[in-house]
Image (cartoon, grey):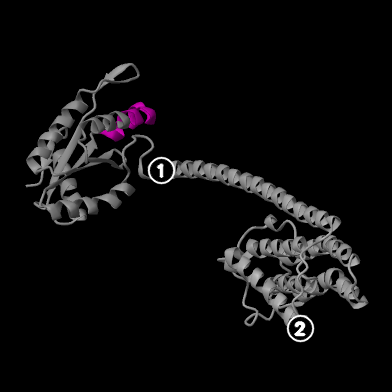
C-alpha cells in the first residue's frame, strides 16, 4: 500500500506529454518524481503491513522460510524495486510495472495465508487506489487482475486454503492501517485541492494583469500610431499617412465608379507672416486653418498637412464642381478668422486648387500633381481664390 499518491494526480499513463522514447534516446532520463514518492511510501507503509502480517503469522504455525519471505517481501523488496526503476531507461514505466508486481505479490500472500479477510481487503484496496491514481479505471482493473493472477498461481502450487477469519488484534491493526492510509489520502487530496485553487487563483490574477497590460500596450500602440500618422502642430494627418491612404481611396472610388476629388491648399504669404510676426504666430495661423479644415470634413474625408503651409484634402465620392464649391466655402471661413498679431487683427488668406479622378488622372501621383498645378494657377491669378483643372 502506498500513501499520498494524490499529491500528483495527472494520469501519467495517458499523459499528453509522454516521456521520451527510451529506444530512441541515448541519454538516461532524470529520475521521475513517482519513483521517489513510491520508494518513500513503500519504505514507510510496508513496515506497517509487515507488522499486520507478522501478527497474523505469529498466531498460526508457519515454517521459518515464511518469516524469511515476510522480511524479503516487506523490507527488502521496496529497496530492490526502487533501484530497478532508478536504473531503468524509462523510470516511470518501470514504476508502473513495479505497482503491478506489488499487486501480484499481494495476491500470492493473500492466497498463501488462506485469504484472511481484512488483510486481503487492505492489499486489494491499497494497490487498486495506487494504480487508479495513474491509470484511472483501467488501473483498477490491472491491479485486481494482477492480484487474481498471484492468487491463482499460489492456489495452483499449494492448493486452495480458505481461512478468512482473523483475530481481533489483526483485524484492528488492518482496520487502523487502511483507515490511516485513507485519511492520509484524503488530507493529501485536500492539500492538493487547496494548492490547485491557489495556483488557479494566481493564474486568474496573472491573466487579468496580462489582459490589463495587453490593453495598455494596445492603447500605447494606437497612440503611437496616431502620433506617427498625425502632425503634432495641427492634429491633421501627415504626408506619411497620405501616402499610405491615397492609393487605397483612389482604387476604391475607381472600383465603385465614383469620383475622388483632391484639394490642395496653401496659406498666402506665409513666409511673410513668419518673418514679420514670428514663428509662434505662424504656428497659430497653421492651427487655425487646420481647425477650419477639420470643421469642413464629412465622414470619410481626409485632411492632411502636406508640408510647410500646404494642406491636402481627400474627398471621396465628390465631383469636381462640388469640390470647387466646398473649396470656396473653406476659403471664406478662413478669411473670416479673427487672429491678432501684436494686438492687431491679422487677415489670413488661402489659395486652393482642385482636381478629380478619374476625370483628370487615373493614378494618385498624377492626381496630386493636377491639383497642385491648379493651386499654382490660383496663386498666379492673384491668390485668395479657387482654381480647378481645365
Residue at image point 86% right, 64% down: 56
Label 2: element kind: helix
Residue wearing tag 1: 222
Query: Magenta part of the protein: which range?
Result: 269-285
Q: Is residue 215 left or right of residue 185?
A: left
* Residue found at x 91% / y 76%: 63
Which image quadrant: the N terminus?
bottom right
Depth check, front residue: 124 or 224: 124
- Residue extending furthest toward the right: 64
Would residue 126 be seen by someone viewing this image from the given angle? yes
Mark 1 falls on what kind of element? helix
Q: Which residue is mark 2?
A: 157
- Label 2, label 1: how far apart the Cα atoms are: 82 Å
Q: Nearer the viewer, mark 2 or mark 1?
A: 2
Q: Position of residue 208 (x, y in %)?
A: 52, 42
Q: Position of residue 47 (x, y in %)?
A: 85, 62
Is 302 on the left-hand or right-hand side of 383?
Answer: right
Quarter-of-image position of residue 102: bottom right
Structural crowding at the residue carrying mark 2, measured as other residues with C-alpha within 10 Å and reported as few (<14), some (14–19) or many (≥20): few
Amino acid at each position: 500500500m502506498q500513501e499520498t499518491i494524490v499529491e500528483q494526480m495527472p494520469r501519467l499513463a495517458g499523459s499528453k506529454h509522454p516521456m521520451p522514447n527510451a529506444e530512441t534516446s541515448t541519454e538516461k532520463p532524470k529520475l521521475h518524481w513517482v519513483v521517489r514518492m513510491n520508494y518513500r511510501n513503500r519504505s514507510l507503509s510496508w513496515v506497517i503491513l509487515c507488522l499486520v502480517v507478522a501478527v497474523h503469522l505469529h498466531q498460526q504455525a508457519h515454517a521459518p522460510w515464511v518469516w524469511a519471505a515476510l522480511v524479503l517481501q516487506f523490507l527488502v523488496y521496496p529497496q530492490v524495486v526502487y533501484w530497478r526503476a532508478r536504473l531503468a531507461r524509462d523510470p516511470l514505466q518501470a514504476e508502473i510495472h513495479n505497482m503491478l508486481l506489488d499487486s501480484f505479490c499481494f495476491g500470492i500472500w493473500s492466497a498463501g495465508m488462506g485469504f484472511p479477510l481484512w488483510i486481503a481487503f487492505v492489499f486489494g484496496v491499497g494497490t487498486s487506489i495506487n494504480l487508479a491514481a495513474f491509470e484511472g479505471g483501467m488501473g483498477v482493473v490491472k491491479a485486481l487482475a494482477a492480484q487474481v493472477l498471484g492468487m491463482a498461481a499460489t492456489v495452483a502450487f499449494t492448493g486452495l486454503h480458505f481461512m478468512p477469519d482473523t483475530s481481533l488484534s489483526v483485524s484492528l491493526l488492518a482496520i487502523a492501517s487502511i483507515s490511516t492510509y485513507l485519511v492520509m489520502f484524503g488530507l493529501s487530496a485536500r492539500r492538493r485541492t487547496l494548492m490547485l485553487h491557489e495556483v488557479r487563483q494566481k493564474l486568474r490574477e496573472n491573466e487579468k494583469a496580462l489582459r490589463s497590460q495587453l490593453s495598455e500596450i494596445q492603447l500605447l500602440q494606437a497612440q503611437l500610431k496616431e502620433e506617427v500618422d498625425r502632425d503634432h502642430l495641427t492634429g491633421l494627418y501627415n504626408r506619411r499617412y497620405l501616402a499610405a491612404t491615397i492609393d487605397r481611396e483612389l482604387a476604391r472610388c475607381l472600383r465603385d465608379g465614383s469620383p475622388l476629388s483632391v484639394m490642395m491648399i496653401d496659406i498666402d504669404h506665409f513666409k511673410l507672416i513668419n518673418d514679420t510676426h514670428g514663428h509662434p504666430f505662424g504656428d497659430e495661423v497653421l492651427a487655425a486653418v487646420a481647425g477650419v479644415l477639420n470643421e469642413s470634413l464629412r465622414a470619410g474625408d481626409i485632411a492632411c498637412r502636406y508640408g510647410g503651409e500646404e494642406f491636402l484634402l481627400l474627398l471621396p465620392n465628390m465631383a469636381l464642381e462640388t469640390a470647387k464649391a466646398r473649396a470656396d466655402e473653406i476659403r471664406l471661413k478662413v478669411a473670416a478668422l479673427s487672429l491678432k498679431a501684436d494686438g492687431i487683427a491679422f487677415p489670413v488668406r488661402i489659395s486652393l486648387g482642385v482636381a478629380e479622378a478619374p476625370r483628370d488622372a487615373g493614378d494618385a501621383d498624377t492626381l496630386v500633381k493636377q491639383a497642385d498645378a491648379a493651386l499654382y494657377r490660383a496663386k498666379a491669378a492673384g491668390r485668395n481664390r479657387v482654381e480647378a483643372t481645365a
